[in-house]
Amino acid sequence: MALGYSTGGQQLRTVFQYLQSYGFIDFVLPALFIFALIFGILQKVALFRTPRLGKDGKPVAEEPKTVADRKINGVLAFVIGFAAVLPHMANMYPAKYDPILLINSLLPNTAVLLVAILAVVLLFGIVNVPGAQKSPALQLLIAVVAAGVLIVKFLMDLFPEFFPGSFDFLRDPSIQAVFVVILVFSLVVYFTFKEPSDVKLHTTIRKWVEDKP
């Protein structure tokens, strides 16, 4: 089946059709996506560690003395990625809970959201919001909001029956992007025009939570 958008020529369209017929979209891309995701998490968590070597190939004496073991993390991510994809190729997953189908349907729908979330970081850098780059609490707030938006989007695609019909308009990616853009500009305007203060953001949030009845 041809892709839904113009590829610029019949030859390129034929190449995409050829790749799709050999399972590039159903096997290779999901496996690479899961591999990259798991590998990045394992590298960040550093559950498996190995001595950090210097240029001479010997363990270094200064901190950090150990780093994440890329070999073990790579093997684990490879196994997990292909272990998730192979049952899909063998039609062993229930159609409604097939993780590969969920990934293939979720990623295109969240592309606009991901671009809008990335715009948050870019806007804070472009307008040089005072203290934004040095505030761990602000960075955590942005990360939590971004993760929350993506989780809600994922749950709406995975369990559509749990959301009332009156919220169907939120399934439209353009509507979701509008909400994210409004949030982005609200944050930029707030941090640009607020009065300078020595009070940290996390202190303000804690005080606001404690003052709630």
Image (tube, rainbow, N blue to C red):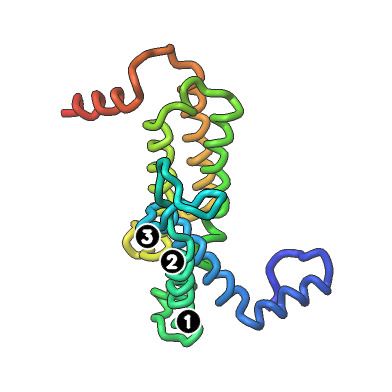
Which quarter of the rendered picture does the C terminus lie within? top left
Are circles 2 and 3 on residues that touch, CB within 8 Å? Answer: yes
* Number of residues whose C-alpha sits closer than 10 Å to that of mark 3, classed few (under 14), some (14–19) or many (20 or more): some
Which quarter of the rendered picture does the N terminus lie within? bottom right
Q: Quadrant of residue 123?
A: top right
For numbered disc 2, what is the local secondary structure?
helix
Between circles 1 and 2, the one closer to the viewer is: 2
Q: Earlier in the sequence, mark 1 or mark 3?
A: 3
Label 1: which residue?
86
Residue 153 seen: no
Residue 92 seen: yes
Asked if 98 appears above or below 111 in the picture, the reply is below
On the image, the x and y values in percent for residue 19 come to 68, 77
Determine the CA span between mark 2 and mark 3.
7 Å
On the image, the x and y values in percent for residue 95 come to 43, 79
Q: Earlier in the sequence, mark 2 or mark 3?
A: 3
Q: Which amino acid is tagged 2?
A: Ile
Label 3: which residue?
48
Determine the CA span between mark 1 and mark 3.
26 Å
Q: Residue at x 53, y 45 (%)?
A: 177
